[in-house]
Amino acid sequence: MPDTNYVSYADLEDLRLEGARFEAPEPLLYDDTLKFSHVRNARVKRVYVVGGRENAIDLNRMCRDICIEDSTLKGGDQATVVVKGGSESVIFDRVIHVPSPKAWCEFLIGDWSDQSNAKTRGVVVW
């Protein structure tokens, strides 16, 4: 069954997000708050993301060259961030991540994806 996401970006290049707040009025209605799917060359700066039932941010389906910096991420009940589905070259730089007490991890890298079984690599958390 596909996820229900609060905000999704898919099949884009050169995405720029700065100073945005992503917080669903009813976060438990959503699996992920901010979803990236096959996004290339994205720069995300100074965002505030509050997680849904699963994650604050989910990157899937061959995302590449993503930089998320100077941001605050409050985790969902699975993890704060999931990077999967063959995504590559993803950097989290100066990111404050606040895990949910229910989460079993903060960053879930290389999790299973029904959209792509390619290997996830090059994920850096500073």
Image (cartoon, grey):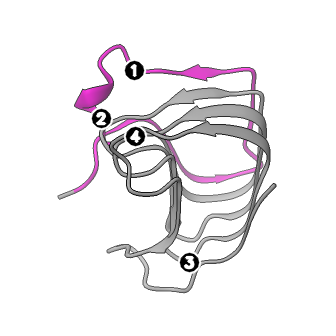
| Residue at the far top in the pictured view | 25
Residue 53, x across and y down, in percent: 30, 39
Q: CA distance from mark 2 to mark 4?
A: 10 Å
Mark 4 or 1, closer to the camera: 4
Quarter location, residue 122: bottom right
Q: Which residue is mark 2?
A: 30
Quarter location, residue 101: top left
Mark 4 or 3, closer to the camera: 4
Q: Is residue 115 magenta?
A: no
Mark 2 is surrounded, within 10 Å at the Cα level, by few (under 14), some (14 to 19) or many (20 or more) other residues, namely: many
Residue 123, x across and y down, in percent: 71, 68
Are circles 4 and 1 on residues that touch, CB within 8 Å? no
Label 3 sits on what residue type? Gly
| Residue at the far bottom in the pictured view | 118
Q: CA distance from mark 1 to mark 3?
A: 28 Å
Are circles 1 and 3 on residues that touch, CB within 8 Å? no
Are circles 2 and 4 on residues that touch, CB within 8 Å? no
Q: Which residue is mark 1?
A: 24
